[in-house]
Image (spheres, rainbow, N blue to C red):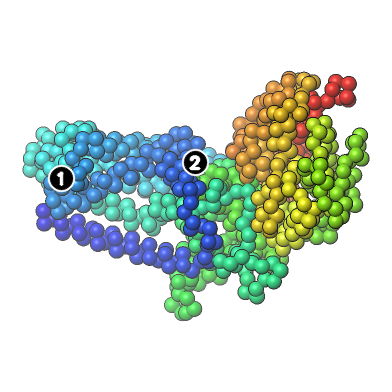
Amino acid sequence: MAVRVIVGLLLIVAAFGSAGRRLLMLYRLGRTAQPVEPGRIRVGAAQLRGEAAEVLGQRKLLTWTVPGTAHLLTFWGFLILGLTLIEGFGALVDRDFHIPWIGTQPWLGFLEDFFAVAVLLAVAVFAGIRLRHRPAREGTRSRFFGSHLGGAWLILFMIFNVIWTLLLYRGAQINTGNFPYENGAFASAAVARVLAPLGATANDVIETAGLLLALGVVLGFLVIVVHSKHLHIFTAVPNVRLSRRPRALGALQPVRSGGKPVDFDDPGEDDVIGRGAIEDFTWKGMLDFASCTECGRCQSQCPAWNTGKPLSPKLLIMSLRDHALAKAPYLLAGDDHANVDALALAEAQRPLVGDDGVITPDVLWSCTTCGACVEQCPVDIEHVDHIVDMRRYQVVMEASFPREAAVLLRNLEHAGDPWGRGAPARLEWTAKLDFPVRVLGDGETLPEDAEYLFWVGCAGAFDERATRTSRAVAELLHTAGVEFVVLGSGETCTGDPARRLGNELLFQELARQNVQTLTSAGVRKIVTTCAHCFNSLGNEYPQLGGDFEVVHHTQLLSRLLAEGRLTPVRPVEATVTYHDPCYLGRHNRVFAAPRDLLGSVAGVRLTEPDRTRERSFCCGAGGARMWLEEPLGTRINENRTDELIATGAEVVAAACPYCIDMLADGVAQRAAEGVTVTDVADVLLRSVRQPEEAS
Ligand code: SF4
Ligand code: SF4
């Protein structure tokens, strides 16, 4: 017993000493970061639900069936096998130790052994997946490309060691009569049968050696975990708990500096807009970086990475984490850097964004803000917020952005739309309608009989393809007897492209102007055809005091169909595939309404592309990328177009003017004969029109 106690204590002191020092350093590093917004630490039903679904239920991981199931078993295995750790530490001082009350129940013995075996199987599955999808075989297509492969194999090896040493000493315990369970522990019993012929003395030695080995492995594992990317084992739980609910998509967060919201009417002299250094991130940002498991699920879905751009959301987060750790001695030294080592000093000199920076401009500007990474991330890392925050600093503090963006920003500033067409042209789209569209004049309030303000959007007013959608929706609303008005020259860009490009000042200017116009006109209900306007008006304008009920046209039309106010009468014989726009689907969870519309039309044969709904692949236009050149890799819109064409559809339907433009360009580029790209409203209109009307 003395050997057990002495060696056991030495192991515990060494491991906890090493792990404790590391954790203290990480804690102090987190304290050098910015405060989080107050709502983050609130514990509400949404947070608890999120924790239960994503941590206990492993919801996101289970969308990947095989690795998800293996991870579920491993996670629960760690929880249940935590009990064997208590038993192990107890057995150091008392060979007959068992957990009080439940510690001799056969069901507990069974459960522990069940999970021991399950974790072993899971390790085999993980190893198989890693071998099958190894970067050496799949190159950049592998989700493990760029991950620390050696570290991951070491962890699998350590888990394997945890399990076999556990079963070894439990088997020996059965033979020495020191096992807490009379039956139920089937795997330990099997090991006991193998060890039994060795005799009592040997089993005695194996019990002690196995126990010390098992505890040594677990404690070694602890030390490795806190020094490696597997820190996520500890940080994932708080990270999920502190993540934005229901998800870090939809609205971008208001700009905060030093933990306080920036007043754009009168910004403070020391206010930092965005993140220009690693310590400008909040401690939740740091927790995000520490929580990345390097699983690569985000990378596998990223449209930028999948088309040969240098941006991988995984590599971006890993770079930020590695930089934070490398700069840590500098940050922790406070104002006295005399004793900081040369490597940390050099790291501190690296710009966060720059050609020699932690993140290169090509990486930063490749993002479409599609949100596929956030959607996939099992530990709820908020990539889009971090990317836009870095863009904010580049644009506002450094005036550094892609050359082509200057034209977009100038047009938004001077004309209020990305094309620079100007307010007077905003009603041209109505000219081809055979009924008058009511326009809200300057200073007028919404007429009592007008139910909706139809927010046309810049594309809906100026882009030729999108104006067709505007007319289709106006015609459908008119047919259904829905009274609506438009703002005409009173409308200006919602500011979505400016905000996603990082120009928060311009966003604030445009958005405040619109909030003022809409509020003073007494607008309550808004319908819009643009997924980006839909997102800004509904999710971001409340940040500026604009509280409106915003619906996407697919939602309103779907309701009008259900109420019988629109009746599709004419079959549209066509195979149709639907492309989920990121800002309608992933960002705002509108998946059913567009499909309902298409499903209501007789003759339509709906076929889904491989990447659909939450996993839809971006068209390439979001994040203001619509107005930027795409010189790197292949084109995102062509990648998506190929997939949509491969469904065999004659009609590619979408529900966002940006997507329709990008996909129509893709179809033209591929010279796909007989394939048209249109809005779902257009398909519905073809069916709603009486046969003699349709021409
Ligand atoms: S938002 Fe989309 S484009 Fe940007 S990093 Fe994430 S997956 Fe890639
Ligand atoms: S950011 Fe999330 S999804 Fe991407 S590799 Fe890290 S843990 Fe996995």
- What residue sits right under mark 2 in the picture? 60
84 lies left or right of 547: left
User: Residue 488 at x, y = what percent?
Assistant: 86, 49
Of the residues under marks 2 and 1, which one precedes in the sequence? 2
Q: Is residue 494 left or right of residue 229?
A: right
Total tally of numbered discs in the picture: 2
SS at badge 2: loop
Q: Name the residue at 83% across, 34% down.
A: 478
Q: Nearer the viewer, residue 363 or 503?
A: 503
Q: Nearer the viewer, mark 2 or mark 1?
A: 2
Q: Nearer the viewer, residue 16 or 532?
A: 532
Q: Which residue is mark 1?
A: 207
Residue 550: x %, y % from top left: 70, 45
Q: Which residue appears at 27% of the width and 39% of the height?
A: 112
- Position of residue 617 relative to residue 260, above or below, is above
Label 2 and label 1: CA atoms lie apart by 40 Å
Q: Residue at coordinates 61% horizontally, 46% vertically from top-left?
A: 371
At x 19%, y 46%, the residue is 100
Answer yes or no: is residue 318 visible. Answer: no
User: Is residue 591 in view?
Assistant: yes
Question: In the picture, residue 432 is in which quadrant?
Answer: top right
Label at residue 287: none
User: What amino acid is found at the position of numbered circle 1 in the picture?
Assistant: Glu
Q: Is residue 213 above or below residue 472?
A: below
Q: Residue 435 location, x and y as percent?
A: 90, 36
Q: What amino acid type is highlighted by mark number 2?
A: Lys
* 354 over 128 or under it: above or below: below
